[in-house]
Amino acid sequence: MIRFARLIDSLVFTPSRNGKLRLIEAYLEGTPDPERGWVMAALTGSLDIRSAKPALIKQMTLERTDPILFDWSYDYVGDLAETVALLWPSPRGINEPPPSVTDLVMGLDGAKKTEVPALIEGWLNACSPDQRYALLKLITGSLRIGISARLAKTALANWSGKGLDDIEELWHVLEPPYVPLFAWMEGRAEKPDSTACATFRPLMLAHPLEDEDIRVLDATEYRAEWKWDGIRVQLTACHGSRRIFSRTGDEIGGAFPDMRDALDFDAVLDGELLVMRHDDSGALEVAPFNDLQQRLNRKTVAAKMAKDYPAYVRLYDLLFDGSEDLRGLPFDERRKRLEGWYARVQPQRMDLSPMIAFDSWQSLGQLRDEARANGIEGLMLKRGDSHYVPGRPKGPWFKWKRDAMTLDCVMMYAQRGHGKRSSYYSDYTFGAWRPDTDGVLELVPVGKAYSGFTDEELVQLDKWIRNHVVERFGPVLQVSQELVLEVAFDAVNRSNRHKSGVAMRFPRIKRIRWDKPASEADTMDHVERLIVE
């Protein structure tokens, strides 16, 4: 725990990417198995400790501290782990060494629910504040220290000298603490087998298409298809094993049993998971993303929900046909193989993402700008000779999103951020005007955003919020209805779950309208027009 706490502390205060890589590599070099494997699982989001929830940690702390002091401290700090680490009252006379990461993981894994509080209490008593902070971040699963899974695996590749693509593929075959993986990386064992059909293969991703790219790239080298507004998935089926993976490798088949049951073949496919329904003519029509969201992040779904929100996959690519690996083929050849496979197998709940004919960047851009149908975010561009490789290489694939929609909204509430932003009010709820039952205009919340502004603008916003507090609701501040934010978003759909009746897709702050009176902000009529468009 001592080395892990030092690593976490150093990563939090190291801004540069290369600096973070060096810290992780040094930790790997000086830490034995299985400790380093558990830590790498935590850094990559692969460690799942279910028995230690934030609510339990908060309740344990409230039983030992003044509740008002805790609320004030939590409000000021903005991070539960940091608040508890500083407030926890360790009894005098404790002379136990801090636990190792392995002690934490194995202890919680084997403990009964009633035993968990005593375990955590003993560990917190034995730790210093910085060790408590690392411990709590680990067991609650919310590190938020500026480390992506890709960056952590890149550190592994740098440290071991092995290929990042090989590590990516093995990562989803093996389980924490990855002892066979480390044995291979250190030359003590053969490379683990990654050929099992029903395992996750890292997805190939795209870069945003910029104006500079358009000036230098030859449009005839690329193939175009719509960028559908669902979630990217990988379908893997082999010898009766059927699994649906998200783009990060999470198995999500439990939320989509109707889709999983349709995987009656031996293949690995890349596609977009969507909710689709038949229109009056019998053709499949893509539903808004909000319909798909009803089923996301669920372990199981009821039959009625599956019927009301039917899942389909629009296929992009064929990675494996049976045991044959097609990823080394050019995209054009893989597309032909996908079309042939689809015609031969005729899978249920799937169709092919259509290819788009175009003759220039200009004509393609016009098609993109005119596409406002449900389910279309923009375009995907794939070079005809591109192989399917993990990660986000620059050049083979691009995404060209349609221009964002915008609304001028009024800030209503603010909340502290996390990690480096825990000292700033950086998460904002904003609203649009709507007449109440008496015809008086009132603000109704239409979205939340925490990105799009610069660090300098964040400081300005934080200062304004602190000077315009109207009321507090725990960690949430209600502010005076004065500040207008120009909000950009990819789409807006109707939603029964929100007071306003609408839900924005990927909202972010485009501009702070210091110059605009709140009375001139947009109304729900503007929002309705965007839904129609």
Image (tube, rainbow, N blue to C red):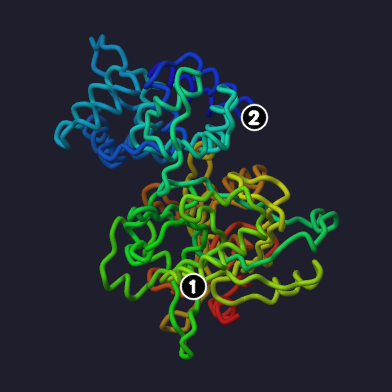
In-image side of 309 versus 432 (left or right): left
In the rendered image, is residue 168 in sight? yes
In-image side of 466 versus 94 (left or right): right
Closest to the observer: 387 or 454? 387
Decide: is 158 above or below 2: below
Secondary-structure class at tag 1: loop
Task: Point out the tag, 1 or 2, that comes first from the N-terminus.
Answer: 2
Secondary-structure class at tag 2: loop
The quarter in which the C terminus is drawn is bottom right
Q: Which residue is mark 2?
A: 16
> Which residue is drawn at the image coordinates 46% and 36% (left, top)?
171
> Which residue is drawn at the image coordinates 53% and 77% (left, top)?
524
Residue 202 rendering spot, x and y as whole percentages? 52, 45
- Marks counted in the figure total 2
| Quarter occupied by residue 196 | top left
> Which residue is drawn at the image coordinates 82% and 59% (left, top)?
218
Q: Which residue is mark 1?
A: 288
Decide: is 224 above or below 77: below
Give the CA separation, mark 1 to mark 2: 39 Å
Furthest toward the right, the residue is 215
The quarter in which the N terminus is drawn is top left
> Which residue is drawn at the image coordinates 26% and 70% (left, top)?
303
Residue 109 rendering spot, x and y as whole percentages? 24, 32
Amino acid type of disc 1? Pro
Residue 147 rendering spot, x and y as whole percentages? 53, 35
In-image side of 147 versus 74 (left or right): right
Decide: is 245 above or below 112: below
| Quarter occupied by residue 100 | top left
Q: Which mark is residue 44?
A: none
Q: Are dots 1 and 2 in contact, CB under 8 Å?
A: no
Mark 2 packing: few (<14 Cα in 10 Å), some, or many (20+)?
Answer: few
Amino acid type of disc 2? Ser
